Amino acid sequence: MQGKNRYIGRSHISEAKFKMIVRYFAHDLPASKIAELSAVSRPTINKLFMKLRLRIAQACESSSPFSGEVEVDESYFGARRVRGKKGRGAAGKTIVFGILERQGKVYTELVPDASKKQLQSAIRGQVSLDSIIHSDGWRGYNGLVDMGYKKHLRVNHGKHEFARGNYHINGIESFWSYAKRRLAKFNGVPRKTFYLHLKECEFRFNHREEDLYDTILTILRENPL
């Protein structure tokens, strides 16, 4: 008789096979390849991965506020740029706001626009007031010191300034490059699942120095699928 799977309830998949699937997932193999290697159907693999990404997103959202030196920025994901629509006005794209704690982790959040109201609200919810914030010159970041933040340092990308000593947002921009490269392999991510794929990128980036397989199993032991 098949033993109970501690990591997923009401499943016909054995714990040993499930752990094998998680290991393949940790190594970032394509779902089609994992289905082939595990002899589990592709639809079942897809359902498992949706549940797994939900747990990963929940783990990301439970992170504590950032402090110290923090970089903030937004990036635009989605279809190719529409002619005549550039930069922060790009049409048809998903706007993602990001915060990176230097020498630490990254946090991402979907925002409806890059307005001062939206960005300040996102920062207030995730960054402690004793932080030093680094950003570019976008007007959406105006007023952070007035909100009570210790210091706000900026680089002006509009004047082709990308670093001035310790003033830069190279860390968060490195994460954007990683996330876009990784998502590109899916040949388009539907809007309804984009958040979960984004959070998976965040999770992989934040735990890149760890054994991702062990980290995922620890999460699932505490909160099974």
Image (spheres, rainbow, N blue to C red):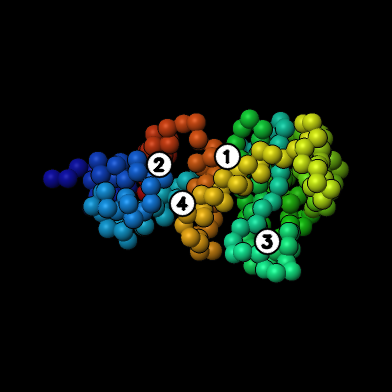
As shown in the figure, which amino acid type bears the numbered disc 4?
Leu
| Residue at the spot 66% in from the left edge and 64% down from the top edge | 81
Q: CA distance from mark 3 to mark 4?
A: 21 Å
Q: CA distance from mark 1 to mark 3?
A: 22 Å
Q: Label 4 near label 3: C-beta < 8 Å?
A: no
The quadrant in which residue 164 appears is: top right
Residue lying at the far bottom in this picture: please name it.
Answer: 83
Dot placed on the residue nearer the N-terminal end, 3 or 2: 2
Give the structural element (helix, strand or loop) at label 2. helix
Q: Which residue is mark 4?
A: 54
Residue 26 disc label: 2
Q: Nearer the viewer, mark 2 or mark 4?
A: 2
Graded by Cα atoms within 10 Å as few (under 14), some (14 to 19) or many (20 or more), the crowding at tag 2 reads: some
From the top left corner, tell me how far across and down residue 115 is, in percent. 77, 57
Dot placed on the residue nearer the N-terminal end, 1 or 3: 1
- Residue 132 can be seen in this image: yes
Give the structural element (helix, strand or loop) at label 1. loop
Give the structural element (helix, strand or loop) at label 3. loop
Graded by Cα atoms within 10 Å as few (under 14), some (14 to 19) or many (20 or more), the crowding at tag 3 reads: few
As shown in the figure, which amino acid type bears the numbered disc 1?
Ser
From the top left corner, tell me how far across and down residue 138 is, in percent. 80, 51
From the top left corner, tell me how far across and down residue 208 is, in percent. 50, 35
- Residue 196 can be seen in this image: no
| Residue at the spot 60% in from the left edge and 47% down from the top edge | 177
As shown in the figure, which amino acid type bears the numbered disc 3?
Pro
Q: Which residue is mark 3?
A: 112
Dot placed on the residue nearer the N-terminal end, 1 or 4: 4
Give the structural element (helix, strand or loop) at label 4. helix
Dot placed on the residue nearer the N-terminal end, 2 or 4: 2
Dot placed on the residue nearer the N-terminal end, 1 or 2: 2
Residue lying at the far left in this picture: please name it.
Answer: 1
